Image: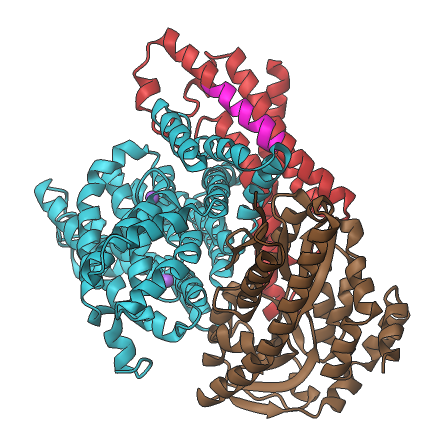
Chain colours: A red, B cyan, C brown
């Protein structure tokens, strides 16, 4: 499990940085194609928006893994270590509940609908189901990280989960 | 019923320390589940979250966050601030004033308070902390000052208002925003100055002319970034979002091959950090958008507004009530949906009381700007906290005097129409 | 028990479409003896046009009004309406919409879990520019024209000789003002209501495309209605369509008068020159999947 999540973390970081770099490149190409080439590219804006969606959803899993999401942390900080473990168990369970319901079931159905109804994007013409795939993928990653955090509550990377600062 | 479930779950989860994005998400999910059938509810929630991120104006955010991180680590910020210190260093707490001015400048360029707080906060806050400023104070200054750019043109939110109002001239609206925006910036600088005086915050002292010239020369390439961004937007070379990409490329070249302050192995960490900060903000935006959808779907904003407008027929009181409602709305809702939902509701009432749609637009945007810096939901507050690496409850105390200044400006702008209307009238864009 | 149909659209409450939909709701209430009602969500509160279509498929929204353009991503037949000068004139346009062809196009939405109930008039789209007036297609050469995010719309601008630049609607005002684009295209009421005339003082009435608004209902919702309820709804929609189309004519005239009052130079175009310019594109499209449909439309007298 530990080896798996470590391998997952590494791959995930590379993916996120790749998405971010591609997004910057897409917006830059938009300027270059309009001015240097005088032939504005039609796909750049849409591509950048889709990449932002992926960065926002998948990056949120990474931020969760790192315990960076913003919250009011007065209460958990005041707990004894034993009680904190109970609190963490409950908090991570809530994240799993949200991920299963909204990201996996809701997002999954959205992918199914857009795939079976053949919806394509306006500029790139790519199937919208590929774009929405970020939702269930985000759900899976959230669940994996939540389970890992519940199994290894002492792990330093999960020590400050859900506490900003 | 849905609104009760939403409010209750949200407040309880927030208090026990669940991250805000999940508080909003879980509360919205529960309220949606009792509003419509299970599968459509969950699918709609997922679609709204993804749809909320599928927005062109949001694209400026990650770009300015990234260029901010690069500038912060690549020596650009250090040079700029050394130069700024020569200019206003003699004033106690001069860096805080520089922060306000930079936020106003960046905010006016980008038209996005979130972008301004990430760009300016990204490189000003570490420097302020190094000089002994409390990072919570710095974050509070950044958050509030960043909102001035929403009033100073170009401003996307004013365009949204103009379209929602169905008949206000955007050119006139832009002119109307200048004075209130500058008034707000001055008020915030005053608060920062008083704070610095009371806490004996450092002034860098006066420096020689030679030192100032060297600092200016050193900072010139970094200052040129501002010229590129402003010049590019004003000259019509690119949009605010594209300016963000240009800022990334320029700061990348400066920090890498020229200053050599970010090595090849550090780039990965720089991009990863920017991506993480972006994602924190985006996940919040996604769940806020889903919540706004639920509120609109259940007609909650309409009901609240109608109930409050039934209270009195005195214009002064109605305006006060509208301001209070908008302040409350701004606390929980994003600016764009709030403007789109509340303009059609409040504007007819305001016009009936003799307030021009132009004046009302400025009141509304200024009011909701305050909401951007208030918990529980405030994107600028979140960004400033994320950039400052501090938590929301820590910056509330330093924010209090800033809120007071913003409220005073709001009252002035609300009850003195001339602040908004003088410029458009003088330039013939509005009937005198 | 009152059956409430929730309807979302992207226009503001002062728009003719919203007023027509209020009429639709009133009529539905009368026809059904108060057992059916319509609740309106204007101003894009519930999402963009593309997202509203998705909400119909998801089943959380009953009805919407969208431009035919965003429907391209769901049903390729809708690309038809972005073909320049496909309709000879307004009479031809309405004749086609109200004939079997128009009904067939609406029926083509069925596999996407949508039902088209009717067409509102969204007028004809014409160019407006910021720097210099456009009189002939030659004036469009290398002029940057903002287009909607649509492959068909891009091809259309390119065929006319312009340089298509996709910019989102909300950003267009500043893009025009700052010179990111040199012009855009839309119908007169939108040109007026968006205040784009403040920064684009030249409007040429070349009327290159007529893209109607389509009234959609979710297939799930439609199939849950009894036959009687379906008939009531269809009648309410038909009556609101009549109201909207009449009102739209007045809006168009009022908008043209208002922009002229504001100093905009409204130029009448020699359309035949523009038509000639796009003949290549039309021949190309005739050979493609839309070919049979284009032919049917051309045959309508
Ligand atoms: Na601005
Ligand atoms: Na707030």
Furthest-top residue in this view: A82
Q: Can the viewer see residue A44 in this picture? A: yes
Furthest-front residue in this view: C33
Identify the image quadrant of the C terminus of chain B.
Answer: bottom left
- Quadrant of picture, ligand 1: bottom left
Q: Is residue C203 above or below residue A69?
A: below
Magenta segment includes A106? no
- Residue C267: horizontal and vertical position, in percent? 59, 91
Quadrant hosting residue A40 = bottom right
Identify the image quadrant of the N terminus of chain B.
Answer: top left
Magenta segment includes A97? yes
Q: Can the viewer see residue A137 in this picture? A: no
Q: Which residues are magenta?
A: A91-104
Q: Is residue B366 above or below residue A132?
A: below
- Residue C30: horizontal and vertical position, in percent? 58, 59
Q: Residue, x 70% and y 47% (percent of image)?
A: C225
Quadrant hosting residue B422 = bottom left
- Residue B397: horizontal and vertical position, in percent? 20, 36
């Amino acid at each position: 499990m530990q080896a798996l999540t470590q391998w997952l973390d590494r791959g995930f970081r590379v993916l996120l940085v790749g998405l971010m770099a591609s997004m910057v490149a897409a917006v830059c190409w938009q300027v270059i194609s309009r001015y240097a080439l005088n032939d504005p590219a039609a796909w750049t804006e849409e591509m950048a928006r889709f990449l932002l969606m992926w960065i926002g959803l998948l990056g949120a899993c990474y931020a969760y893994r790192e315990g960076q999401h913003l919250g009011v942390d007065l209460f958990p900080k005041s707990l004894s270590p034993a009680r904190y473990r109970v609190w963490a168990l409950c908090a991570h369970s809530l994240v799993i509940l949200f991920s299963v319901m909204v990201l996996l079931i809701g997002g999954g159905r959205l992918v199914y609908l857009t795939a079976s109804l053949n919806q394509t994007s306006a500029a790139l013409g790519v199937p919208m189901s590929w774009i929405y795939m970020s939702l269930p993928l985000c759900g899976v990653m959230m669940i994996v990280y939540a389970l890992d955090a519940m199994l290894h509550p002492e792990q330093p990377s999960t020590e400050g989960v859900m506490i900003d600062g | 019923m849905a609104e009760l479930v939403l409010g209750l779950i949200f407040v309880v989860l927030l208090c026990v320390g669940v991250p805000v994005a999940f508080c909003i998400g879980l509360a919205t999910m529960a309220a949606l589940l009792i509003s419509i059938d299970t599968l459509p509810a969950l699918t709609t929630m997922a679609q709204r979250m993804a749809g909320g991120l599928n927005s062109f104006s949001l694209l400026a955010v990650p770009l300015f966050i990234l260029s901010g991180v690069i500038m912060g680590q690549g020596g650009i910020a250090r040079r700029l601030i050394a130069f700024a210190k020569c200019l206003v260093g003699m004033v106690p707490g001069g860096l805080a004033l520089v922060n306000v001015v930079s936020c106003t400048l960046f905010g006016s360029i980008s038209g996005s308070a979130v972008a301004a707080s990430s760009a300016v906060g990204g490189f000003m806050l570490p420097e302020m902390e190094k000089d002994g400023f409390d990072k919570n104070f710095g974050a509070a200054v950044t958050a509030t000052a960043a909102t001035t750019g929403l009033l100073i043109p170009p401003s996307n939110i004013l365009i949204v208002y103009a379209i929602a109002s169905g008949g206000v001239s955007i050119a006139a609206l832009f002119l109307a925003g200048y004075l209130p925006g500058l008034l707000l910036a001055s008020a915030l600088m005053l608060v920062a100055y008083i704070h610095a005086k009371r806490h004996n915050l450092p002034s860098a002292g006066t420096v020689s002319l030679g030192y100032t010239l060297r600092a200016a020369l050193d900072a010139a390439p970094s200052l040129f970034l501002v010229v590129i961004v402003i010049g590019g937007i004003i000259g019509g070379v690119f949009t605010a979002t594209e300016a963000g990409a240009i800022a990334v490329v320029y700061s990348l070249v400066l920090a890498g091959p020229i200053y050599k302050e970010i090595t090849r192995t550090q780039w990965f960490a720089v991009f990863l950090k920017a991506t993480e900060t972006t994602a924190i903000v985006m996940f919040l935006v996604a769940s806020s958008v889903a919540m706004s959808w639920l509120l609109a779907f259940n007609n909650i904003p309409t009901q609240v507004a109608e109930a409050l407008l039934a209270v009195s027929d005195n214009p002064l009181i109605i305006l006060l009530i509208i301001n209070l409602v908008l302040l409350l709305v701004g606390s929980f809702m994003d600016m764009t949906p709030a403007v789109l939902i509340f303009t059609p509701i409040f504007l007819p009432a305001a016009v009936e009381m003799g307030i021009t749609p132009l004046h009302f637009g400025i009141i509304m945007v200024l009011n909701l700007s305050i909401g951007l810096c208030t918990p529980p939901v405030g994107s600028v507050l979140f960004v400033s906290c994320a950039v400052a690496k501090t938590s929301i409850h820590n910056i509330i105390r330093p924010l209090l005097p800033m809120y007071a200044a913003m409220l005073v400006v709001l009252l002035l702008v609300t009850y003195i129409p001339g602040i908004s209307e003088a410029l458009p009238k003088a330039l013939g864009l509005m009937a005198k | 028990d009152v059956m409430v149909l929730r309807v979302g659209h992207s226009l503001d409450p002062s728009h003719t479409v919203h007023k027509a939909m209020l009429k639709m709701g009133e009529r539905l209430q009368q026809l059904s003896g108060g057992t059916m009602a319509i609740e309106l969500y204007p101003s894009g509160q519930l999402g963009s046009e593309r997202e509203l279509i998705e909400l119909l498929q998801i089943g959380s929204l009953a009805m919407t009004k969208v431009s035919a353009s965003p429907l391209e991503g769901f049903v390729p037949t809708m690309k038809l309406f972005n073909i320049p000068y496909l309709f000879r004139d307004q009479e031809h346009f309405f004749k086609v919409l109200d004939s079997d062809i128009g009904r067939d196009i609406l029926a083509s939405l069925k596999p996407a879990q949508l039902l088209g109930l009717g067409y509102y008039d969204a007028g004809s789209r014409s160019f407006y520019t910021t720097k210099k007036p456009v009189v002939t297609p030659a004036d469009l050469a290398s002029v940057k024209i903002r287009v909607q995010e649509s492959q068909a719309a891009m091809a259309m601008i390119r065929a006319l000789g312009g340089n298509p630049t996709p910019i989102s609607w909300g950003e267009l005002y500043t893009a025009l003002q700052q010179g990111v684009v040199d012009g855009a295209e839309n119908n007169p009421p939108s040109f007026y209501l968006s205040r784009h005339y403040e920064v684009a003082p030249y409007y040429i009435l070349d009327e290159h495309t007529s893209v109607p608004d389509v009234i959609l209902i979710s297939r799930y919702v439609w199939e849950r209605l009894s036959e009687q309820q379906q008939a009531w709804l269809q009648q309410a929609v038909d009556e609101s369509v009549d109201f909207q189309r009449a009102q739209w004519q007045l809006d168009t005239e009022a908008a043209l008068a208002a922009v002229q009052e504001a100093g905009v130079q409204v130029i009448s175009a020699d359309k035949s020159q523009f038509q000639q310019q796009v003949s290549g594109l039309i021949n190309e499209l005739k050979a493609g999947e839309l070919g049979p449909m284009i032919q049917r439309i051309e045959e309508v007298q």
